[in-house]
Image (cartoon, rainbow, N blue to C red):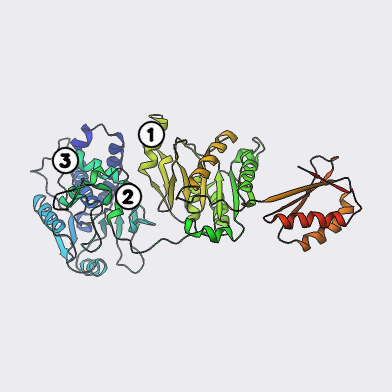
Amino acid sequence: MEIEEAIRECDDRRLKTKYKNAIYVIQRALALYSIEEVAFSFNGGKDSTVLLHLLRAGYALHKREQSHSNGDLTDREFTFPIRTIYFESPSAFPEINSFTYETSSTYHMQMDIIRQDFKSGLEALLRTQPIRVIFLGVRIGDPTAVGQEQFSPSSPGWPPFMRVNPILDWSYRDVWAFLLTCKVHYCSLYDQGYTSIGSIHDTVPNALLCISKSANSKENFQPAYLLPDGRLERAGRAKKFSPPVCGRVSNDLENVNLRQNHMLTASVIAVGDEILFGTVEDQLGPSLCRKLHSIGWVVSQIAVVRNDIDSVAEEVERQKSTKDMVFIYGGVGPLQSDVTVAGVAKAFGVRLAPDEEFEEYLRHLIGDKCTGDRNEMAQLPEGITELLHHEMLPVPLIKCLNVIVLTATNVTELDRQWDCLIELSRCSSGVLVQAESFVSKHLTTTLSDLETTQPLSKLCLEFPDLYIGCYRKSRSGHLVISFEGKDRARVEAAAESLCKKFKPGAFSEID
């Protein structure tokens, strides 16, 4: 089989792994179900074109194993026996229809043409055919992929069948690597700048591939396989809705005024058994609190959780809906204990999906040091991840709606990442809004706690808009009273009110 030979001879290790895994899924399905019970949904797009040729290769290998033959089947000896379903639509591109019928003829596909909607058409087909399994070219990142696995039963309310998704974990890059490596024919629209094809009503060439305008003002586009960032695959598709914003306040610059009119709150989550065991002292949390305080934010909680996906997810879920921003660090990396990103994904109810752009950064950073089949660190929460780029950062920071994942392992790294966040926040991205600064005042006294407790309690009731706290730097040290607020006049008034409750000289101001 020419597909298997092309993959065997290529030097793309990633593609070989993706191919091997997809073929395994196909062979597993063919071993579990008879050929009469299997169907393939083909729509003429790049993903289903990839799946068509994977099925051809997978079925050839399946037949070879059944006959215990070591020889390759030639194209002339091979016919494609899997029933193929094509949902023909009046809103489909003519090029898609032409490509579909040409492909069907080329590979002698047994094709059922359905001119109804997907659900009604399937119901009618399954009433007359013994189909129990349908191969689909669904990939992570597709709108229909949420919640699916490689083997997933159909959704409630749909006719019962098993959805098999051999290329679920494939990226945009993987799809084009396969098509170009195997030199298979694909729809001509992809050479005209289309990167994701829907209907004629909601699809245009991807503007990111536009290269020039000709003399007659017609735009020219590069082919789809030259799109540098696969996450922008659907940039040529019309957007029908905007995703909901998580958290009390959204993170755009349009909401700066709203943010500045209320106290911005953050929580800090440290992930690490070593902190809970007392093996390592957490220095990042206090440093991060000081940094947030310096730009007018209030840190309402610091939490330390175990290196456990559920523990991380529970804490993130608890904090993200009540805080303007959540900062989380620790547990980021390739080790089995590095579960932070997976925990964040679970907290938002999304899966981890391969991110081509992030993987490219990691590849430049770690080279060939990754020993596994794929770099698990390049798996990011699906559909909610924004990469925060800065030239001073070797790898972008990860932002999932109102959760920022910091990769710092020491205070020096935290300082650098924080400076980058602040600089990015001055740009149009509005990553971290700087609020009105706090005004503080500190008084010290030799009075005892018992002498000051009642007057301080009354003072807190008089000035509920201020943070009034007490502490000693050592057991024998003097008591320090701190006043924090956004209004200098109120802070001064509170300090003056406290002094008036005692004899002159009872308090002195300190820096």
Question: Residue 183 shows which numbered tag?
Answer: 3
Which residue is more in the foreground, 370 or 231? 231
- Are the residues at dot 2 and dot 3 in contact (C-beta closer than 8 Å)? no
Q: Residues within 10 Å of mark 2 (few under 14, many from 20)?
A: some
Q: Residue furthest right?
A: 503
Residue type, numbered disc 2: Leu
> In the rendered structure, which disc, 2 or 3, sits on the residue that comes first in sequence?
3
Q: Residues within 10 Å of mark 3 (few under 14, many from 20)?
A: few
Q: Quadrant of the N terminus?
A: top left
Say what secondary structure mark 2 lies in: helix
Residue type, numbered disc 1: Arg
Q: Quadrant of the C terminus?
A: top right
Residue at 27% x, 68% y is: 119
Horizontal side of residue 425 vs 72, given as left or right: right
Which residue has dot 2 on it?
232
Q: Residue furthest top?
A: 368
Q: CA distance from mark 2 to mark 1?
A: 20 Å
Question: Residue 305: percent from the left, percent from the top?
Answer: 60, 46
Residue type, numbered disc 3: Lys
Which residue has dot 1 on it?
363
Residue at 45% x, 35% y is: 394
Task: Answer yes or no: is residue 436 visible.
Answer: yes
Of circles 1 and 3, which is in front?
A: 1
